[in-house]
């Protein structure tokens, strides 16, 4: 006599996936801890994903708590190939340090990257001081000409910001398409500078960095004398 097979017990990963799918199908409307209807509508208009993030216990098990996050602008840029994986990693690290150390943004954002392991034993005040110092070091490691891109990344912690906004700083007299292209170039150069600061390998050669910097400097000089 053969015994009936038992159904495989779902592990934590399956449970989290099922709960996340359920929450995202239901949506965040009506949740006290979700994004405001205005922020949600803006994200949906721009085609950004609104994700549910399950909070885990210290033992690594999923809890009944969760928070919502709107896909950061850099996630979409990475998906489209505007920035590479290494540039994304550097940008995200800077955004995480800024978020934890200097400015968390509106409470409705719920943009909450995890802490680094090395600060687990620090007090909240010590953690903030630690991350603020790291964010400032990274900011100062980027050439001043490219620092508007870091301001763009900080702004992107909240509402999604088109690259045209960044490009308009360098090419105010140009059209939207040119400004978007200019913004992408500036962002990539800034991310490469962050890669070098964080010692993340990147795909830019020194010659390419110098050439693009020359083009950017010429564009900036032209815009200020026009």
Image (cartoon, grey):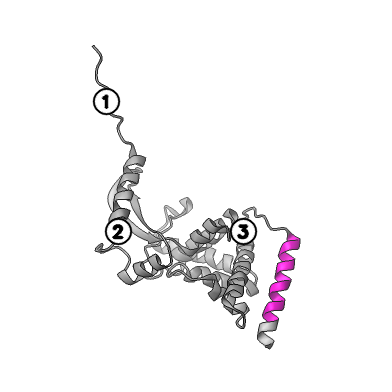
Give the numbered dot on residue 133. Answer: none
Residue at 30 percent of width and 54 percent of height: 25
Span of residues in magenta:
206-221
Between disc 3 and disc 2, the foreground one is 2
Residue at 73 percent of width and 72 percent of height: 214
Mark 2–mark 1 contact, CB under 8 Å? no
57 horizontally vs 74: left or right: left
Give the numbered dot on residue 195. Answer: 3
Tell me where residue 77 appears, x and y as whole percent: 53, 61
Task: Point out the tag, 3 or 1, that comes first from the N-terminus.
Answer: 1
Task: Report the predominant secondary structure element of the magenta stretch.
Answer: helix
Is 32 in the magenta?
Answer: no
Residue denoted by label 1:
6
Q: Quadrant of the N terminus?
A: top left
Tell me where residue 202 appears, x and y as whole percent: 65, 55
Closer to the camera in the image, 46 or 93: 46
Tell me where residue 151 appears, x and y as whole percent: 53, 72
Mark 1, other Cα within 10 Å: few <14 / some 14–19 / many ≥20 = few
Q: Measured along the vertical axis of the image, is residue 188 above or below residue 59?
A: below
Q: Measured along the vertical axis of the image, is residue 223 above or below residue 107?
A: below
Calculate the distance from the C-alpha at mark 3 to the C-alpha at mark 2.
Answer: 36 Å
Closer to the camera in the image, 30 or 157: 30
Residue denoted by label 2:
27
């Amino acid at each position: 006599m053969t015994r009936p097979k038992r159904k495989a017990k779902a592990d934590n990963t399956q449970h989290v996936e099922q709960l996340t799918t359920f929450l995202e199908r239901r949506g965040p409307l009506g949740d006290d801890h979700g994004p405001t209807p205005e922020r949600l509508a803006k994200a949906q208009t721009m085609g950004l994903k609104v994700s549910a993030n399950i909070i885990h216990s210290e033992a690594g098990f999923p809890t009944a708590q969760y928070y919502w996050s709107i896909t950061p602008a850099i996630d979409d840029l990475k998906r489209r190939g505007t920035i590479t994986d290494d540039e994304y990693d550097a940008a995200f690290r800077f955004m995480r340090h800024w978020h934890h150390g200097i400015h968390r943004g509106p409470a409705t954002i719920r943009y909450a990257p995890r802490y680094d392991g090395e600060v687990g034993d620090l007090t909240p005040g010590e953690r903030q001081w630690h991350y603020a110092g790291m964010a400032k070091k990274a900011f100062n490691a980027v050439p001043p000409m490219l620092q508007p891109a870091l301001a763009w990344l900080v702004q992107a912690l909240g509402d999604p910001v088109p690259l045209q906004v960044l490009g308009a700083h360098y090419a105010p007299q140009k059209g939207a398409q040119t400004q978007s292209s200019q913004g992408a170039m500036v962002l990539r150069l800034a991310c490469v500078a962050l890669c070098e600061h964080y010692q993340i390998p990147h795909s830019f050669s020194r010659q390419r960095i110098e050439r693009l910097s020359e083009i950017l400097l010429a564009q900036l000089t032209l815009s200020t004398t026009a």
